[in-house]
Amino acid sequence: MISSADFQRHFGRYQDEAIKAPLAITRNGRERLVLLSVEEYQRMKRRSRQVMGIEDFTPADLDAILQAEPPPEAAAFDHECST
C-alpha cells in the first residue's frame, strides 16, 4: 500500500512496480484505488463471468446440474458446510 501523496511524488517508480504486481493506493489511510499492469487488467477481464438467472438455463442445463456429482477431492471441504 502506498499513500496517494507518495504516489504523486514518485509516479514513475510506482508505474514500474505495478508492472510486477498490483499496488493499492490509499487516501486518509483507506484503500481507494489499485494500479495494475495492462496485462493483468486484460487477464482479469478475460476471466470475468456473466451472471445468469435461472430463466437463462434450458431444461437440459438444469437436469445436468441436478445430476452433477462433486469430484472425490471435494470431500476435503465437507467440514465447511453447516448442518
Image (spheres, rainbow, N blue to C red):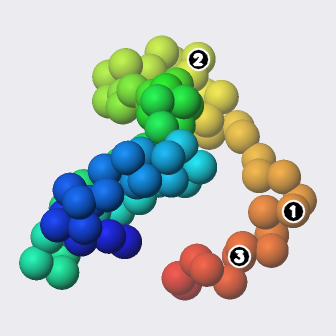
Helix, strand or loop at label 2? It is helix
Residue 43 position, x and y percent, is 55, 31
Q: CA distance from mark 2 to mark 3?
A: 28 Å
Q: Where is residue 29, by image quadrant?
A: bottom left
Q: Is residue 7 left or right of residue 23?
A: left
Which amino acid type is marked by label 1? Answer: Glu
Q: Which badge, 2 or 3, is on the more N-terminal residue?
A: 2
Q: Are marks 1 and 3 in contact (CB under 8 Å)?
A: no
Residue at numbered disc 1: 73
Residue 66 position, x and y percent, is 62, 39
Neighbour class for label 1 at 10 Å: few (<14), some, many (≥20)? few
Q: Is residue 20 left or right of residue 14?
A: right
Q: Is residue 25 left or right of residue 50?
A: left
Above or below — where is 83 with respect to 74?
below
Q: Nearer the viewer, residue 23 or 42?
A: 23
Residue 54 position, x and y percent, is 36, 30
Q: Residue furthest left?
A: 28
Residue 78 position, x and y percent, is 71, 76
- For the image, the number of numbered tags is 3
Number of the label disc, if any, that sits on residue 60: 2
Residue at numbered disc 3: 78
Helix, strand or loop at label 1? It is helix
In the rendered image, is residue 64 in sight?
yes
Q: Nearer the viewer, residue 34 or 56?
A: 34
Q: Which badge, 1 or 2, is on the more N-terminal residue?
A: 2
The residue under the point 65% across, 28% down is: 64
Q: Which quadrant is the N terminus positioned in?
A: bottom left
Q: Which badge, 1 or 3, is on the more N-terminal residue?
A: 1
The residue under the point 61% across, 80% down is: 80
